[in-house]
Amino acid sequence: MTTSEPDDAPVADELDWHCYRHPDREAGVRCRRCERAICPDCMISAPVGFQCRECVKGAPAVRTLRSLRRDPYVTMALIAVNVAVFLPSMGASDQRGDLGLFGPAVADGDWWRIVTSGFLHFDLLHIGFNMALLWWLGSMLEPALGRVRFGILYAGALVGGSLGVLVLDPNALTGGASGAVFGLMGAAFLSQRRNGVDPMQSGLGGLLLINLLFSFRPGVSIGGHVGGLLGGALLITLLNATDRDRQQRWLGAAGAAALTAMLAGASLYVAHNPL
């Protein structure tokens, strides 16, 4: 799909930062089509950033920011799986031994640990914090990306976190959704910047920095957090670069799935050949 600029579109250099419909209001975003400054009340979220009301009039299938936040079913399913894994034993030691990420066990053939460890939590605070962040970030990203592409993003961030653990601390028994959640934070950060939103003003940038600092506490897996963050950043860069039309989005999803498989393969390789 291509778009054309309206004939009366103002030159970017001539724009001021007051909403074109509400001159008394400061505007922090420009319409992606006509480049006019728009305030939050005039913003409509479109497949490529925010647009003004005039540019989306009569266009089919344009969704408002409110409608974009509905029904994040994949996010709900992921939370349900995490809770279902946690509740029977409440993170008891026998469950950790069966599902946790442990480099020597992966090298001995327990390849599934690079995935199951992302659904293992050790206590109520651990799962509660991760699920709260997963709900917030998933409700933001899933409607914008679509269920399939969001699911691939989550899977890639999860195995990226496992790869980070196996690179930096393969002999530690680790678990938790925080690697995947860090990947979602990185994806949301880059998506906000791409759409003209300052992550530091939205609060997401500060949250990311604080969590990165907490990653250096004893007992926290810095490899899992950084690996998930980098994995999510790589995947969202690919997905955002291939969202122009339906065919391109499917090609981008296939590429993201291939990258996820490569991260999983790299995890298995590193487990068998510790650095």
Image: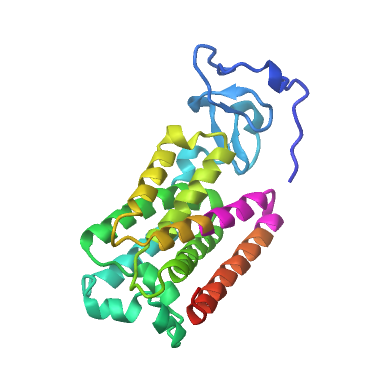
Question: Residue 226, how many percent across, how many down?
Answer: 45, 57
Q: Quadrant of residue 58?
A: top right
Q: Is residue 252 above or below residue 10?
A: below
How many numbered dots are placed on residues in this image?
0
- Region rendered in magenta: 231-249
Q: Is residue 127 left or right of residue 113?
A: left
Q: Is residue 244 left or right of residue 124?
A: right
Q: Is residue 70 left or right of residue 88?
A: right
Name, please, the residue furthest toward the top: 24
Name, please, the residue furthest toward the front: 275
Q: Is residue 182 above or below residue 14?
A: below
Q: Is residue 26 above or below residue 123?
A: above
Residue visible at 44% across and 88% down in the picture: 108
Question: Residue 235, how many percent across, how many down?
Answer: 57, 57
Question: Residue 64, how many percent across, how many down?
Answer: 52, 38
Residue visible at 51% across and 50% down in the picture: 187
Color scheme of the displayed model: rainbow
Q: Is residue 8 above or below residue 218?
A: above
Q: Main secondary structure of the magenta part?
A: helix
Residue visible at 65% across and 18% down in the picture: 15
Question: Residue 230, how many percent across, how many down?
Answer: 52, 56
Residue visible at 55% across and 69% down in the picture: 263
Name, please, the residue furthest toward the bottom: 108
Q: Is residue 51 magenta?
A: no
